[in-house]
Amino acid sequence: MPLRIVNVKVNGVDQAFMAKPDTTLLLALREQLGLMGAKRGCAQGACGSCTVLLDGAPVVSCLVPAATIDGAAVATVEGLADGQELNDVQQAFVDGFATQCGFCTPGMIMSAEALLARNPDPTADEVNEAISGNVCRCTGYAPIVSAILEAARRRRDRAGTAEQEATR
Amino acid sequence: MARIDTEYFRDERASDFKVIGTAVQRSDALGHVTGRTEFMEDRTFPNLAHLKIHRSSHHHALINDVDYSEALKVPGVLRVITYKDVPENWYGVLRLIGIGPDDEPVLAEDRVLYKGEPIVAVVADSEAAALEGASKVKVTYTELKAVLDVEEAMLPDTPVFKRAGTNYFVYEGHHARRIRFGDVEAGFAEADHIFEWRYSSAPIEHAPTETTGCIVVPQSGGRLLIHSNTQAAFFTLDNTALTLKRPFTDLQVKGGTVGGGFGGKVDVMVEPLACIAAAMTNRPVKFVYSREEEMQVSSPRAAERIYIKDGVMNDGRIIARKIMLYVDAGAYARHSPYGATKAAAHLPGPYTIPNVYADCHCVYTNRTPSSAMRGFGVTIADFAIESQMDQVARALHIDPLEFRLRNAYRDGDMKAHRKVASGTALIEVIQRTAELVGHELPEEYRAMSSSTPRGAGA
């Protein structure tokens, strides 16, 4: 089987790995780059546990052939926090008790990040739509939706404050 | 956060609680949101081998021949494991608490009792090679008639397919877990009305987001370290050691992080074979269910069939209740004998009924073995009991809450299990529920109390 060198920027860092034709992005992240945040729940694109951002768009990484993403930027849950400092979505999940077993959490958070990047002020319906591909079998959807709405509010507040300070 | 109602049992509440009534952060949340929580599959090991299973394609069949010669030819396949490689092939997970007989083989011997039953395990360098090897195993069968219905399995002319001699679990010499209290037939004879309905439920799969699995790593001196997502680490350790015929101290289980269990990860399905494979190859071995296996062969909540017959007086008192309950254990016992016992413990519901008769059967069929799931035994029994309460109330044109209040157990009542009821609160819970949903109860029902004996002050 031909191997292919794939160059990607993962969480802002240049990385390279060897991909076989059957290497998925999920396997590359987990087994070659050591990033275990994205989970294998079904390996068939149905559960969303492996959701990461590929050039900003949410993808189920278990269905992305790694050899096809040369030159792309990948964002995973490991890249969100700034040192010990959680980002807004992570902090809102903690504050709002939006985790149970935790297996769906990284995928859920990445879907939320993708939503907030293009829509800073989503409605609950829009949040539901954004996480409709992420299964939480503990069925803790209500606190998850609340946490995402709360994260959006905090992020808007912060942006508003920054703007005020800039114009002062 | 929901407000905690401190009105009830206020005399029994400690006033110096430090945690109850406050929000305490989960200790695992930080790991979950940063992706640092280490689940079973998040560990990597050099030289990791993979185990996959060749499974039965029939519900019920004799195995004539198993030919794994083609599997061994697949590049990367290391070993093929059959029942002959399992030191103690027959097991039952409840053997740890003295419940038997051991009725299930780790790997099938001369027959299969359900579709998907494991027959041969293939260990290989890669997951793909293990899958290909498993697919190359050839099993020839003589198909037998499958029994897929609990009541059919109990019929005298249905062939017995269980080696213990009955298609049902035997409870201390009896065909079912039984309740006998008062004289139920006399109660029916005296009753103004007889109501009888059948309730049934389908199996329910837990479908945890993280599938069942383990990684076994050989240690120095022959010890085996098991990284598992089991819900029951010591239960898994002890059962695995018994299957391996090795001292408990030869094994170490690391676990406790479970990506969804709900009762579906207590059956000890993967660890024994992964241990055997790790010992054979002296390599770390991963055995993790695919999503398809999780859905098809991991044990679901049992399907149940429940008949409830009630004798009821014109004033709404239930004076006799007879229940015939069937738990579909599937092909093997696993935790189902315990589930049927729990069902019996839960009957006839939180109501005081002077005549009760119940047979709770744990029945074997040629279906996927069922096992534990969130309140198993109780949950479906409750569904049947409370559906029955609603149907009887409707038939008698009595308000369903009032009907329950008339029959609710109270402190001091003798229960069908010959225990005196204490600490009862059904009446207060119904009263408060009615209040919360704006359902007006007449004064007579608002004045009822669990601590006032039945009939007093009426």
Image: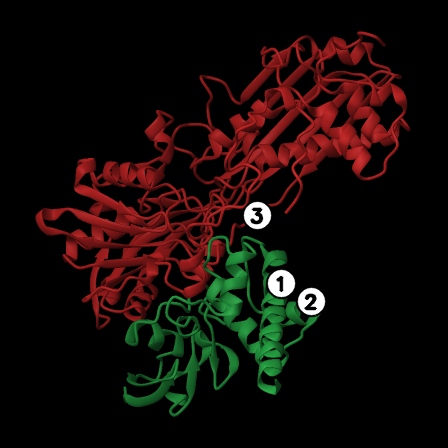
Chain colours: A green, B red
Residue drawn at x 63%, y 32% is: B381
In the visual, does B441 lie left or right of B28?
Answer: right
Residue hosting label 3: B204
Q: Looking at this view, is A145 or B195 the one in front?
A: A145
Q: Secondary structure at mark 1?
A: helix
| Neighbour tally class for label 2: few under 14, some 14-19, many 20 plus, Cα within 10 Å | some
Q: Position of residue B305 (x, y in %)?
A: 64, 35
Residue type at the position of mark 1: Val
Q: Is residue B313 found left or right of B228 in the rendered image?
A: right
Give the residue type that dot 2 points to. Ala
Picture layout, residue A53 above or below residue B14? below
Contact? badges 2 and 1 (CB < 8 Å): yes
Q: Is residue B129 left or right of residue B58?
A: left
State the CA–CA distance, disc 2 to disc 1: 7 Å
Give the labeled residue for mark 2. A124
* Corner quadrant of residue B398: top right
Residue at disc 2, secondary structure: helix
Percent position (x, y) of residue B27?
Answer: 42, 50
Dot 3 amino acid type: Ile
**Does residue B322 sit above or below A165 in this rendering?**
above
Q: Which mark is residue B399?
A: none
Chain containing the residue with disc 1: A
Q: Which residue is labeled 1 in the image?
A: A145
Is residue B244 among what the camera can see? yes
Q: Give me the residue at 62% from left, 63% from top.
A: A145
* Residue found 45% across the figure and 70% down from its top: A50
